[in-house]
Amino acid sequence: MPDTSDKFSLRCLMCGHAMPDADINRCPVCGGTLEIVYELDRLRDEFEPQGRGMWRAFDLLPVRDRAHIVSLGEGDTPLLLSASLGPAWGLPDLHFKLEGMCPTGSYKDRIAAVSMSRAREVGKTAWAATSSGNAGASLSAYGVRAGLAGHLFVLEKASRAKIAQILMYGPRLRAVQGLGVDRDVEIQTFANVLDLCDRHNWMMMVTARKFSPFGMEGCKTIAYEICDQLGRAPDVVYVPVGGGGLLSSVWKGFQEWAALGLTDGLPRLVAVQGEGCAPVVDAYAAGRDVEPIAACHGTVSGLQLAAPPDGQLALRAVRESGGWAIAAPDPDTYRVHGELAAREGLFVEPAAAIVAAAVELDRAAGRLHGDETVVCLLTGIGFKVMDAVNRLTEAVEIPLIRADDILAL
Ligand SMILES: [Zn+2]
């Protein structure tokens, strides 16, 4: 086996402490968030994409032995040029990255794949996580594939459709009172799951860089794929922000791809939140750090985090990239959710539709120019919210006809 001891190292994003790889998930000096660091100078000459899907970028993922890879075929999701909404909004080069095409229906599969591979490589016996639903489904599916038992803590009001999918994979599931509504419960839950994992040598798999710096590396491959699919970096990328880890990881991906000379330039990143739950947007607008909000009143499943664990990292990425942050009202999100289906043929979840709603708002406000290449990260598939979709469509009356009426149409 080749010597992979120098494949990557760790560095604290808060205090800068650098260290070799170790089975830790936060900085041993200050408790800060860890960054995985690769030798980009060396890889600039040596990196050769191999195979298919997300693992084509194996050299840039924190797994040393390919034998430990846990995969259900994630990655290589389509990037589609908008057929209707883009032209209608005066944005002929608007694209949709369809993360709902991942095996369990959301981008979280990229995180789960790396998390479970890492767990196998460092010899963990089980995993534990909190989730609003999508990460829970991903981790549960990939946990089955990895042969690791799972303990999942979900929001008190998690979408029943998401729970149904999770139950099919069979992890130990518990709903936490007040999680997703109460900030203090949110902070206490994260801390307690972390303690539980430390005590039992389980892998903490909350999908945030603050808790899962290794697994979150999976997200950045979305940026690699966008550059490869476009043949260049886009001008602007819209990303939904719940915890903030996706946006921050995608920014790392664009930076790495540029550092390797695989794309020119970097996009501006736009953080999108719902109006009722927008701590990152509030911080951006006020020119300050991200502070938890007292309570989350947003209704978009997946984005209900009052104290986003990677919120500050997301804000930093927005600022570094020259982008901005915008809050979309929930009614706009649900209207565009319907338009994506009826006008683009894209059945996504509202947490994905929100970025398209933000694009429409920004274009109307003159923040986007008509000649810009814009990418919307559509994070999950519409089947994730079938309970809401059923409520929306149950009143629609379906005409009942006889077979011989068909020719009379
Ligand atoms: Zn530190």
Image (tube, rainbow, N blue to C red):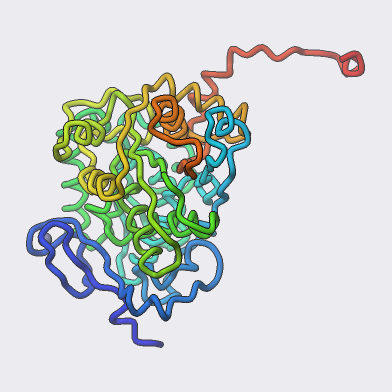
Please state the horizontal and vertical placement of residue 35, each as a whole percent of the image: 24, 62
Which quarter is ligand 1 in?
bottom left
- Closer to us: 222 or 233: 233
Q: Is residue 298 left or right of residue 311?
A: right
Residue 7 pos. (x, y %): 32, 77
Residue drawn at (30%, 38%), measured in percent from left and top? 324
Q: Is residue 28 above or below residue 3?
A: above
Residue placed furthest toward the left: 29
In the foreground, 219 or 129? 219
Residue 298 sits above or below residue 117 on the image:
above
Q: Residue at x 41, y 44 (%)?
A: 236
Question: Which quadrant of the structure image shows residue 367?
Answer: top left
Q: How many marks?
A: 0
Q: How far from the left and from the top, in percent, is residue 69?
A: 44, 68
Among the 4 quarters of the image, the one containing residue 178: top left
The C terminus appears in which quarter of the rendering? top right
Quarter of the image holding residue 345? top right
Q: Work out whether residue 101 or residue 127 is closer to the camera in this orientation and state it.
A: 101
Q: Is residue 350 visible?
A: no
Does residue 374 appear left or right of residue 397 in this picture? Answer: left
User: Is there any visible trace of residue 325 in the rendered image?
Assistant: yes
Q: Position of residue 406 (x, y in %)?
A: 88, 18
